[in-house]
Each structure stands twice: as C-alpha cells, then as structure tokens.
Image (cartoon, rainbow, N blue to C red):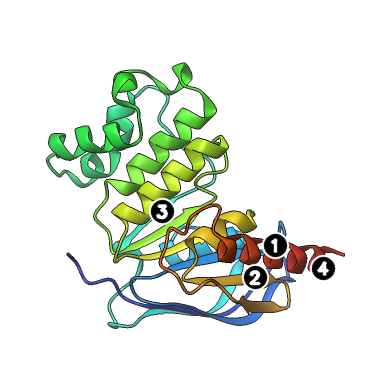
Amino acid sequence: MIQSPGIKVTGSASINGKTLFAPLTLNLEAGQWTCLLGGSGVGKSTVLRLISGLPTEAEFKGDITASDKSAVAPRVAYMAQDDLLLPWASVSQNILLGARLRGDRPDSDRLRRILDRVDLTGHATKKPAELSGGQRQRVALARTLIEDKPVILLDEPFSALDAQTRAAMQDLAAELLQGKTVLIVTHDPAEAARLGNAIVVMTPDGLTHCPHPPSSIPRPVDDLETLECQASLLRYLRAQAA
C-alpha cells in the first residue's frame, strides 16, 4: 500500500475582497478520517478544492503541504457534491473514467468487485439518466473508491442515500479506505460521530476541534458513545447557528 501522508492547510480565503474564512490551520493526520462540519458558505468545499488543486473562485493566501514534502494534488481522489457523471457513458465507463483519462489499462476484476460492493452489478451498462439519485451517488462513490490514491477528499458523499444504504456505504468506505488520509465534508453529526478520527467544525472565524469517541471507525450507529457524540455535535452546531 502507498504510504498516506499527513496534510496541513494553513491560510485564509476571500471572494471579491470579502473574507470566506479567516486564517486557519487544518491538520489531516496520516491514515485517519477527518470530518469537517459547519454551516453552508463557510468554505468547506473550497478547502477540498484547494487541496485537490482544482480551480476555485476564492482567493487563497496560504500553503498546502504534505508531511513527506511531496506534491499533494497528484495524490488526491476527489468526490464532489454533484455526481459529475458523463451522461453518454455507462455506469462501468463512468467508474473507470480516471484510468481511461490517464491512459491506464482498466482493472476489470476490481471494477466487478466494486460494482458488487455498491450493489450496482445489475446496472453496469445503464446510462446515468436511467438511475435514481441514490444510484448515481453510488456510482460517483465507486469511481472514487476504485482509485488507489493515498489522499481521499469526500464532499457529502452519502447525502442522497436512504438511511440503511448510507450506513452500508459508510461501512464500505471505511473498509476500503483504511490507511488512507481522508477528509470528508458533511452536514450530518451522526455521520461525523460514526466516521471521525478527528471532528472539526468550521466557521468564518476559524476551526473548533470537537471530541470524538475513542473507538475505531466505523462506529456502530446505536452505540451509546456514538449517540452521545452525535447529540453533542448537534447542540454545538445549533448554538453556532443561533
């Protein structure tokens, strides 16, 4: 397995001269899941785009560095909020898009395993227009999971899924991304309580690190410590919004 680095984001961002987020330091521990919560418009998705090297309307003043001093962006697999599926391509072709763009030979065996794990085997030849919103999101998730990248950025990756499927996909992601450095943006305190090795709440003024259960992820949905963490996060988020 490729060694996953720690990532450090330091700096501030503005849009048209208006502060998006104040100077902050976000540390992503190597091989751990960091959950980033906060209200809409505070810059969470911008942080993901900055790490991935994608264009953003925000002006960023700062640095993004890896613990091993190598470039960060080439080692990132990024799942955006929108599924960004190619409408003319099949489910399988969309999942294998990264390999095709790089000119790599598609791994058919790995594709079959991923399709089975996200319960899309019977939809492999369908086009996105033939799928439900939850199925499309699972295609986008599969496209990210199939990439063997050491840094994984997930922007609300389970938001379109029903509760049962969401828990199953959280379990799958935690299993397949074990040892990766993962940053997940979520609005769901329950999700953060299940998946966070670190839980950070972002506001325009900076970051707040919140306690998380000491147990390993993914934590049981009905575990008392998970539920207590979820409740504590919800109270904090509501207080921030008041």
Q: Earlier in the sequence, mark 4 or mark 1?
A: 1
Report which residue position mark 1 lands on. Answer: 231
Q: CA distance from mark 4 to mark 2?
A: 12 Å
Report which residue position mark 2 lands on. Answer: 201
Residue type indicated by callout 4 = Ala
Q: Position of residue 171 (x, y in %)?
A: 40, 49
Sort mark 4 into few (<14), some (14-19) or many (20+) by Cα contacts within 10 Å. Answer: few
In front here: 228 or 112? 228
Q: CA distance from mark 4 to mark 3?
A: 31 Å
Q: Earlier in the sequence, mark 4 or mark 3?
A: 3
Q: CA distance from mark 3 to mark 1?
A: 29 Å
Q: CA distance from mark 2 to mark 1?
A: 14 Å
Residue type indicated by callout 2 = Val
Q: Position of residue 112 (x, y in %)?
A: 20, 32
Q: Is residue 190 visible?
A: yes
Asked which secondary structure carries label 2, the reply is: strand
Sort mark 1 into few (<14), some (14-19) or many (20+) by Cα contacts within 10 Å. Answer: some
Q: Quadrant of the C terminus?
A: bottom right
Q: Position of residue 42 (x, y in %)?
A: 69, 64
Q: Earlier in the sequence, mark 2 or mark 1?
A: 2
As drawn, the label of residue 78 is 3
Residue type indicated by callout 3 = Tyr
Q: CA distance from mark 3 to mark 2?
A: 20 Å
As drawn, the label of residue 239 is 4
Q: Nearer the viewer, mark 4 or mark 2?
A: 4
